[in-house]
Amino acid sequence: QSLAKSPETLSAEAAFGALEGWEDVEPIMKTDDLMAPLKVIYESLVTTGFELVADGRVSDIIRRVAIFGLTLVPLDIREESTKHTLALDAITRHLGIGSYKEWDETARLSWLQSELTSRRPLFRIRDVENNLLGLDPDVIKTLMVFKVASEQEPESLGAYVISQATSASDVLAVMLLQKQFGMTKATGKLMRVVPLFETLDDLTGSPKQLQTLFGITSYIGSISGKQEVMVGYSDSAKDAGRLAACWAQYTAQEAMAKVADKFGVELTFFHGKGGTVGRGGNPALYRAILSHPPNTINGRFRVTEQGEMIRQNFGSLEIAERSLDIYTAALLRERFTKHIEPKQKWRDQMQRVSEASCSNYRYLVREDPRFVPYFRQATPELELGILNIGSRPAKRNPKGGVESLRAIPWTFAWAQTRMHLSAWLGVGAGLNSENEEDRATLREMYEEWPWFREIISLISMLVSKTDFSITKNYDELLVDPDLMSLGDEVRTMLVETRQAVIDVSGSKDISGPHVQLMRASSMIRNPYVDSINVVQAELLKVLRAMPADDSSDLTPELKEIKKVRIDALLLSIKGIAQGMKNSG
């Protein structure tokens, strides 16, 4: 009895009594609904002379709510443009008006604009849920994503990113599908639609697509003067090679910024980068931001952090704070930095370098019949798909070749063998020239143009990480004799690339500005990583010689041995990735 009547117990009873009836109270779902009473509390404290209290925890809470809202991090949705095309094709066929997939761009834009201004829905949502329209399961899945999104609170969702976007109709298609499920500007549930331009052709054509979009009255009226565009670094480099992709990204961003400025639209670029140089990554984050094309950041910057780079840059409170400090400092500095505008002769030289580099890269990757089998034998590419170490399937099309392979396993596989081919292939052909004037211009560009210097420095760093003896060991253990010559040719290209980079930079060492870092890396990490590479090559050899999982020759004893070896292979992959430090 005495315990029940203690002050502590009474205060607890009072507290719980104050919470009675909470089940009948609507939860706060919008930031403004929480921000309003917080501001009342703040102003009340200031008015009554408690400024110190107001500027303490109350201010901290207000700042957190302003930055993070109630969801901490809004969720982006990402889907390929082909999925939306197939969904709309199924709908137009059901409506009896033809095949959307077979229409040209003009016909698609005309129909999409008409439907966006129409009040009539395309179909009844319950008919899709109950599959009364006879739609393909993949089409239903695509449509149901929009239904689920429409049921969320607006602040829970961010951007709808369209992978492999090629045209203005890809953007309007997503706008129309959102409208079908009640996600419009009027309802407050409209997600911002972000086209992702990935390949060389898509990047080149991106300014024209924005011009078309901004010329559509219904579209420009729905975006409130703001547009976000995602630039694909990984797939463009896989499509055309490092140098050609970099130049396409530079010129595309320049041109898109001019289009947006012409129409009075605030443009934000979302940079789809990975940890590797081959996927647009740069360990020198501060310099990387400052070297972006002029007038393309303007205080607005989105970028992806992927793979082991998340742990590396945000794995502890101190490191996360430091990483955010670097982002903030670079963005503030960029706003007040006078950028170097490339001279016309620099642009002409980059165009020559881009074309030569792209031609050399594509000839080996796409036209040489030896390349695909060599790639699959000399690297753990085939094994990456069965190890479940990625967030997405290794290939967009399981039956396709290198062109269907996602950029992550493409880059990751070459990093594992210490060849790093995806970061440098084509660079030597682009930088080499028998014309003395070309060579002088390239050296001038390196000295005076931060963007170009940063690219060359990164390539030199990756090339310095390559190891001839390690890659040759993979070839000798895993590659068919009739393909061995290609490995020798690739290593010859690497030697030429090393020399070309040294000639342009004027450095005596391939590591260039990273020489101290690379020496430390070689002395400390390489002895450990070298041994893991040797073990991995042996594991790949014995695993590939074992019976397939569905083979009758795979006895229970062999099955257990195979499982242990696969586990060992996975550990070797993780070990090499950590040793390389920028393979994500």
Image: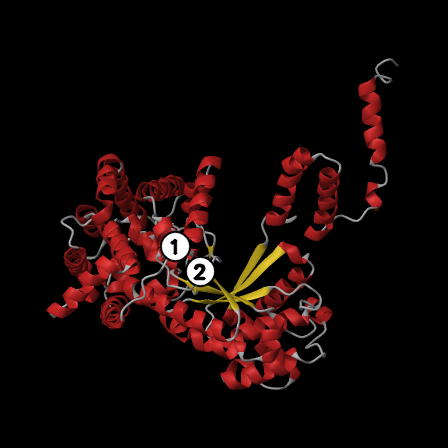
Q: Can you give x and y, in whole percent of width and height, for residue 312 in the image?
A: 41, 41
Hey, which quadrant is residue 57 in on the image? top right
Is residue 269 left or right of 515 when viewed as pictured?
Answer: right
Is residue 360 left or right of 67 when viewed as pictured?
Answer: left
Residue at image coords 38%, 61%: 233
Q: CA distance from mark 1 to mark 2?
A: 9 Å
Hey, which quadrant is residue 576 in on the image? top left
Quick one: 357 or 563, which is closer to the camera?
357
Above or below: residue 547 compared with residue 5: below
- Local packing at callout 1 (Cα closer than 10 Å; few below 14, some 14-19, many 20+) is many
Residue type at tag 1:
Ile
Question: Is residue 377 in view?
Answer: no
Quick one: 157 or 392, which is closer to the camera?
157
Residue type at tag 2:
Ile
Q: Secondary structure at mark 1?
A: helix
Mark nearer the N terminus (1 vs 2): 1
Residue at image coords 19%, 59%: 490
Q: Can you give x and y, in whole percent of width and height, for residue 49 in the image?
A: 72, 35
For disc 2, the marked residue is 297
- Answer whether labels 1 and 2 touch (C-beta < 8 Å): yes
Q: How many marks?
A: 2
For disc 1, the marked residue is 289
